[in-house]
Amino acid sequence: MATDIAILAAGILMIAAGVGAVLAKSLLVSIILSGGVSLVASAVFLLMGAPDVAMAEAAIGSGLTMVVFLYALARSKQADAEDSDERVESPASETGGAV
């Protein structure tokens, strides 16, 4: 009975985190919340008696996927910063620096 209540609570938490990830304005918050969904899912698998699946979900779903998403986010922000620098310099260099 207590296990059923814990699984139900975890399911509600996963739904709330998933909705929060979709509605979040920040990509970083979305990535963290989606990793939280995966981490809670691994706890549910553990409660259901599947420790091997729980370990795989925690390692791949929560760990590796979040690292890849955070790396991609950092690379895209770096590319955005480089693009914005080029856009600022480009009009001034075409007019010879004079406005």
Image (cartoon, grey):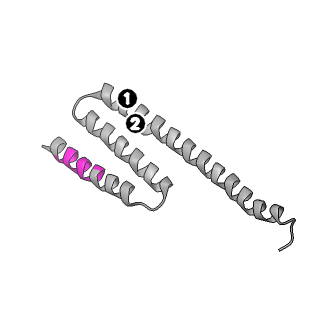
Do the numbered discs 2 and 1 sit on residues whose CB atoms are within 8 Å? yes
Farthest residue in the left direction? 1
Which residue was labeled with disc 2? 61
Q: Residues within 10 Å of mark 1 (few under 14, many from 20)?
A: few
The structure residue drawn at horizontal position 73% and vertical position 56%, both measured from the top left corner, is 86
Which residue was labeled with disc 1? 56
Residue nearest the viewer, comparing 52 with 19: 19
The overriding secondary structure of the stretch rendered in magenta is helix
Residue nearest the viewer, comparing 1 with 52: 52
13 part of magenta stretch:
yes
- Amino acid type, label 2: Gly
- Amino acid type, label 1: Ala
Q: Which residues are magenta?
A: 5-14
Q: Which sits earlier in the primary sequence, circle 2 or circle 1?
A: 1
Residue nearest the viewer, comparing 8 with 29: 29
Q: Quadrant of residue 80?
A: bottom right
Q: Residues within 10 Å of mark 2 (few under 14, many from 20)?
A: many
Alpha carbons under labels 2 and 1: distance apart: 7 Å
SS for dot 1: helix
The structure residue drawn at horizontal position 37% and vertical position 42%, both measured from the top left corner, is 39
The structure residue drawn at horizontal position 26% and vertical position 28%, both measured from the top left corner, is 50
Q: Position of residue 26 (x, y in %)?
A: 48, 59
Q: Position of residue 59 (x, y in %)?
A: 43, 32
SS for dot 2: helix
